[in-house]
Image (cartoon, rainbow, N blue to C red):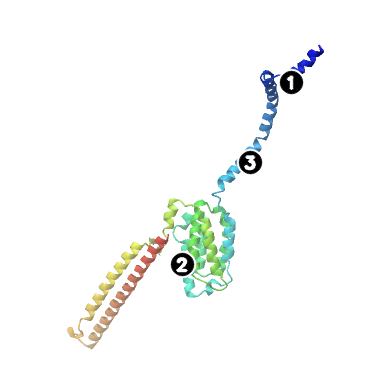
């Protein structure tokens, strides 16, 4: 009996792997079955946290490549640089005032309310009007309101607003160095922040609207100015100038003694009328020629800007 008792542990220990492998899987399976509810409970209890972290990371990772810069700091930086010393705009030289008016036009021209929204569009229109009037106080108060426009800048409005900033900033850039560098700082800030805001592509309607950079305004009437229309206007101006020149030449070729007058007063009146007609004809011819040359130069400038874009 002792031998048998001793042999069973020895036999169990010395059993080959094939012979002793049968009971082991059953015990292992039992252990797994006993532990499986615990592991399931552990996974189920912990599952919301990984899921939340996974969703957070996936959402963060999904927005990472297309992450946009925060708008509020850009607007605050723009507002800070647009706050100028008192009477700064009114003291600008005449040539810089003309550049300031061009910047105001680029900032607010066209369908600004449709592109940038009612609130932002109204602010840009009022700011452009303050620049045209060289009203530094009104310009400063409006510039301080720029950070409050952050909730109204949707994706398309943000891009359109950024493009307008870039266009107006280039006008400030052409002013060069003046004073303590305020205009240069405005140009750099507007161009840099405008490019950051206009990263997102705008919809097709906004693209078409932004192409309308130049318009002639006659009260409520707005006429888009293109290179083709400028060339046509130059041709019309040249034709009208040539016609005026020929009419003046015809009036000048009439001799004074070709007509008989009742008295000297009638003769003097005829001479005065002839001089007036000559002055009107030659003046009209000269103005038409200058207008034609200006329109040709404008057409070349528009073509160069379209190629650069």
- Could you tell which of marks 3 and 1 lies nearer the N-terminus? 1
164 and 3: which one is in front? 3
Give the alpha-carbon distance from disc 3 to disc 2, as whole Å: 52 Å
Residue 289, placed above or below residue 6: below
Say which residue appears at 29% left-offset and 67% top-offset: 236
Question: Is residue 117 visible to us here?
Answer: no
Number of other residues with Cα within 10 Å of mark 3, as a class: few under 14, some 14 to 19, many 20 or more: few
Query: Answer yes or no: do the residues labelled 3 and 1 have beta carbons within 8 Å?
Result: no
> What is the secondary structure assignment of the residue under circle 2?
helix
228 and 136: which one is in front? 228
Query: Answer yes or no: do the residues labelled 1 and 2 have beta carbons within 8 Å?
Result: no
- Nearest to viewer (mark 3 / mark 2): 3
> What is the secondary structure assignment of the residue under circle 1?
helix
Give the alpha-carbon distance from disc 3 to disc 1, as whole Å: 50 Å
Residue on which disc 1 sits: 13
At which x and y percent is residue 56? 61, 43
Please, which residue is most extreme toward the top here?
1
Give the alpha-carbon distance from disc 1 to disc 2, as whole Å: 99 Å
Residue 174 vs residue 77: left or right?
A: left
Residue on which disc 2 sits: 102
- Which quadrant is home to the C terminus? bottom left
At which x and y percent is residue 96? 49, 72
Number of other residues with Cα within 10 Å of mark 1, as a class: few under 14, some 14 to 19, many 20 or more: few
Question: Is residue 152 visible to us here?
Answer: yes
Residue on which disc 3 sits: 53
Residue 304, placed above or below residue 88: above
């Amino acid at each position: 009996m002792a031998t048998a008792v001793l042999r069973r542990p020895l036999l169990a220990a010395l059993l080959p792997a094939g012979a002793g492998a049968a009971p082991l899987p059953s015990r292992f399976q039992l252990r797994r079955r006993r532990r499986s509810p615990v592991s399931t409970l552990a996974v189920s209890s912990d599952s919301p946290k990984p899921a939340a972290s996974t969703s957070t990371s996936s959402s963060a990772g999904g927005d990472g490549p297309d992450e946009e810069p925060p708008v509020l700091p850009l607007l605050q930086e723009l507002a800070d640089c647009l706050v100028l010393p008192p009477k700064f705009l009114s003291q600008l030289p005449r040539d810089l005032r003309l550049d300031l008016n061009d910047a105001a036009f680029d900032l607010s021209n066209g369908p600004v309310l449709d592109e940038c929204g009612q609130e932002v569009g109204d602010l840009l229109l009022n700011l452009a009007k303050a620049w045209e009037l060289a009203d530094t106080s009104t310009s400063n108060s409006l510039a301080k309101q720029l950070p409050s426009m952050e909730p109204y800048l949707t994706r398309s409005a943000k891009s359109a607003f950024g493009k307008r900033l870039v266009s107006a900033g280039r006008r400030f850039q052409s002013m060069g160095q003046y004073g303590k560098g305020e205009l240069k700082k405005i140009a750099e800030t507007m161009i840099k922040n405008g490019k950051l805001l206009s990263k997102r592509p705008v919809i097709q309607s906004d693209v078409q609207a932004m192409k309308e950079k130049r318009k002639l305004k006659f009260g409520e009437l707005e006429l888009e100015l293109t290179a083709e229309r400028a060339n046509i206007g130059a041709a019309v101006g040249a034709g009208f100038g040539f016609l005026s020149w020929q009419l003046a030449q015809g009036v000048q070729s009439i001799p004074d003694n070709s007509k008989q007058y009742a008295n000297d007063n009638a003769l003097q009146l005829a001479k005065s009328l002839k001089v007036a007609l000559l002055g009107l004809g030659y003046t009209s011819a000269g103005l038409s020629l200058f207008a034609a040359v200006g329109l040709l130069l404008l057409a070349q400038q528009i073509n160069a800007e379209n190629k650069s874009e």
